[in-house]
Image (spheres, rainbow, N blue to C red):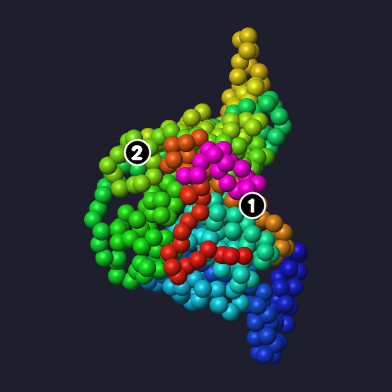
């Protein structure tokens, strides 16, 4: 009987709809389209594309614009979106032109790190909300500019450190916050990855057909095109990124800061270098151990290329974090988390917790949070300040490695207190006509 009533009710609603004048139907459809949140993507190759597709799972969203300097790839992505959604987005090679797209509410930035600052600030100045990939910038100075711009233009800015929205990581940190581990004196994080070998030196060439290489370089120094410096592997060259430290490191460092309710270190020292592959094409280290003093705890970061291990956890090559307390250790990565009790006088000091596997999609949760915050105007789960702090910790580790010095950080002054050489690495020198935002 209930099904019959439901059928009649639905039939009646359909009859009313079909009895409306065509103009009224068109007006209703137009109103629905106007309610749709329209976004664009700058940098369509890797995580930017993943971020956009995750965001478009939210009802009432639509991508109307794509931007990239690689014309063949840009066409491919536009074709894919048209097939998926039935609408072909406008395409651009210049992000500033994309920002002029009518009805555009927000943008995703998935370009190489050295572009993030310019593009995010331009987007904020154009009145757009922003989802920017991590690390937010390729220098500490740029990261500070981005914080100022986001607040100056009053924009919602979500940083792509998506563990902040992942129920798996949230549950692990909730356990940490119970205090069951006792005082945390040391935290470790690592990216001991399986990849990295075979990155051979190759000769410079002409850019691929359809690639605007000058625009790809943007504010970075002018150099001949080299395939190693392009898609994906750009991150192993100082001009554009900071290697594993600013790639995986930023994700794990962010969770250290979240768990310890910390922001910036007092000092940092690093050892390592190109120890595994001294003659490969990369500039950034394949092996690095970095030690930070946060005052009430120490933090140790380690990275190894092509030597996949996972301390405390079983998933080989999976980066993670371990909080080491008086009574036990909480170890977390994207696959699982568990608690290892310490012992005293033959007794465990707390209950062990076996591995709890993740069954969540942290990226989807993070892009959904971005959507909700665009609508509510609340701060997102990973604010621009959180992105700045994680990037700062990572960049300081790299600077300590590059200078070979122990660095004392003064956050009030935004300066390394004891090493003038390190100060030169805090701020980039942009290639004309690009210029750092003056605020």
Q: Position of residue 203 (x, y in %)?
A: 23, 56
Q: Quadrant of the N terminus?
A: bottom right
Q: Position of residue 314 (x, y in %)?
A: 48, 31
Task: Write the residue at 68% across / 80% down.
Answer: 31
Q: Position of residue 171 (x, y in %)?
A: 65, 39
Residue 311 appears in view:
yes
Q: Is residue 67 left or right of residue 37?
A: left
Q: Quadrant of the C terminus?
A: bottom right
| Outermost residue toward the top in this view | 345
Secondary structure beneath label 2: loop
Task: Write the residue at 71% across / 29% down.
Answer: 179
Residue position for label 2: 274
Q: Nearer the viewer, residue 24 or 93?
A: 93
Residue position for label 1: 385
Residue 358 appears in view:
no
User: For the residue carrying disc 1, how many other residues have a C-alpha within 10 Å: few (<14), some (14-19), or many (20+)?
Assistant: many
Q: Which residues are magenta?
A: 407-421
């Amino acid at each position: 009987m209930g099904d019959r009533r439901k059928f009649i009710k639905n039939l009646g609603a359909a009859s009313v709809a079909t009895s409306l004048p065509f103009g009224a139907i068109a007006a209703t459809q137009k109103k629905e389209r106007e309610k749709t949140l329209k976004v664009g993507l700058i940098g369509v190759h890797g995580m930017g594309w993943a971020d956009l597709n995750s965001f478009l799972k939210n009802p009432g969203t639509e991508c109307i614009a794509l931007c990239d300097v690689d014309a063949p790839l840009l066409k491919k992505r536009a074709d894919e979106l048209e097939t998926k959604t039935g609408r072909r987005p406008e395409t651009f090679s210049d992000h500033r032109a994309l920002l002029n797209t009518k009805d555009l509410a927000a943008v995703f930035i998935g370009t190489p790190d050295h572009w993030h600052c310019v593009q995010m600030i331009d987007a904020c100045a154009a009145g757009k909300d922003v989802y920017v990939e991590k690390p937010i910038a390729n220098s500490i100075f740029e990261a500070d500019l981005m914080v100022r711009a986001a607040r100056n233009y009053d924009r919602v800015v979500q940083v792509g450190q998506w563990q902040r929205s992942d129920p798996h990581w949230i549950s692990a940190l909730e356990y940490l916050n119970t205090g069951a581990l006792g005082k945390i004196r040391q935290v470790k994080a690592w990216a001991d990855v399986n990849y990295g070998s075979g990155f051979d030196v190759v000769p410079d060439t002409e850019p691929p057909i359809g690639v605007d290489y000058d625009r790809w370089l943007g504010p970075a120094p002018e150099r001949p095109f080299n395939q190693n410096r392009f898609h994906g592997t750009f991150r192993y060259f100082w001009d554009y990124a900071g290697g594993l430290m600013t790639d995986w490191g930023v994700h794990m460092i962010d969770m250290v800061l979240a768990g310890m309710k910390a922001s910036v270190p007092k000092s940092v020292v690093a050892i390592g270098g190109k120890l595994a592959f001294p003659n490969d094409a990369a500039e950034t280290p394949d092996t690095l151990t970095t030690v930070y003093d946060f005052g009430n705890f120490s933090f140790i970061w380690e990275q190894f290329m092509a030597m996949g291990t996972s301390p405390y956890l079983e998933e080989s090559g999976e980066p993670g974090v371990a909080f080491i307390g008086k009574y036990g250790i909480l170890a977390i990565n994207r696959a699982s988390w568990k608690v290892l009790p310490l012992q005293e006088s033959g007794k465990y000091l707390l209950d062990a917790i076996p591995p709890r596997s993740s069954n969540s999609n942290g990226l989807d949760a993070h892009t959904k949070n971005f959507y909700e915050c665009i609508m509510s105007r609340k701060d997102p789960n990973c604010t621009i300040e959180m992105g700045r702090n994680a990037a700062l910790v990572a960049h300081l580790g790299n600077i300590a490695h590059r200078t070979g010095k122990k660095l004392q950080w003064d956050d009030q002054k935004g300066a390394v207190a004891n090493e003038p050489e390190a100060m030169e690495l805090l701020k980039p020198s942009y290639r004309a006509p690009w210029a750092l935002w003056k605020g």
